[in-house]
Amino acid sequence: MSWPVTMYYCTACDFEQGDWVTWGTREYVLNSGVRIPVHWHIGWCASCNGIVAVENLSMKIRMQDYRAAQRELSKFSRSMFGVSKHHKSMMGRLEDDSNNAIDALEMLMARKNPPHCLLCLSKQVHELNDPQLDDEAPDSPCIFNASNQHAGESKLKQKDNGQHWQHPECAGQIKTKLADGGLRIALRPSIQRFTAEGLLIDKEFVDGNSIPDSEYYDALSKSNWKYRAQSQVKEVGHPSLITSFLRARCS
Ligand SMILES: [Zn+2]
Ligand SMILES: [Zn+2]
């Protein structure tokens, strides 16, 4: 599978850049061994001198993820009379999303580093000024969780929608357009892994067609369940602050 390329260009200078630099799948590896998706948004990196994917450390988005997963889970549990394989798999994915959100909130509460550029890891990053992107899920084939792993392409197709940003240190505006000739790029799927503080651990190429295949996400889910079971054994009697908070607010 290939992805359409969106070009960023400046209305006042010759700045032009393809958006593929923001593509890819990224995970945080927590101290417990659990791996959760990196949330990111479009930003400007002074070190790369271009548009990059920047870590998005918003707790609000993770809280929204948690609530969305809980809402869907409660709908499922109300509507289920017989448990089919499909239902079980959907419930498992939603539970993963919910647990990922809780772990992300805990990670963010302890996080010391400011956001990094996910290309060069510089901290010299800032958001590009566009209210449309505030607190939105990212919009490229960067995959966040198993339940929305195919969301990237449809979003990309809508991308030439008049978004624009101020080009830093330039009088022009950065706008987007689809690449000439309908250029599409196929990616060799890879996972970049980061510590909870945003430092790069490794990059692994995996099976899949531009994005990791479903077996990757099944294995990730199993691995996370194993690590979470281990950490819950340690947590018994001492639930973490965030878990207690969410249980109290959302039960
Ligand atoms: Zn410019
Ligand atoms: Zn950079």
Image (spheres, rainbow, N blue to C red):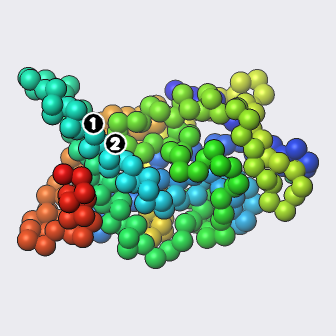
Dot 1, crowdedness within 10 Å: few (<14), some or many (≥20)?
some
User: Hey, which quadrant is residue 78 in on the image?
Assistant: top left
How far apart are the two marked residues, 1 and 2, measured between alpha carbons? 6 Å
Q: Is residue 27 visible?
A: no
Tell me the amino acid under the disc marked 1: Glu
Where does the image place residue 41, in percent across and percent down from the top left?
57, 52
At a point 25% along the width and 57% down the height, the residue shown is 249
At a point 29% along the width and 58% down the height, the residue shown is 102
Where does the image place residue 63, in percent across and percent down from the top left?
37, 54
Where does the image place residue 13, in percent across and percent down from the top left?
91, 49
Q: Nearer the viewer, residue 90 or 133?
A: 133
Q: Is residue 11 left or right of residue 199?
A: right
At a point 75% along the width and 44% down the height, the residue shown is 164
Q: Is residue 181 left or right of residue 66?
A: right
Where does the image place residue 8, in percent across and percent down from the top left?
75, 42
Tell me the amino acid under the disc marked 2: Ala
Q: Which residue is mark 2?
A: 68
* Label 1: which secondary element: helix
User: Hey, which quadrant is residue 38 in on the image?
Assistant: bottom left
Q: Is residue 53 left or right of residue 34?
A: right
Dot 2, crowdedness within 10 Å: few (<14), some or many (≥20)?
some
Say if mark 1 contacts mark 2, CB within 8 Å: yes
Q: Which residue is mark 1?
A: 72
* Label 2: which secondary element: helix
What numbered label is drawn on residue 85?
none
Q: Nearer the viewer, residue 159 or 2?
A: 159
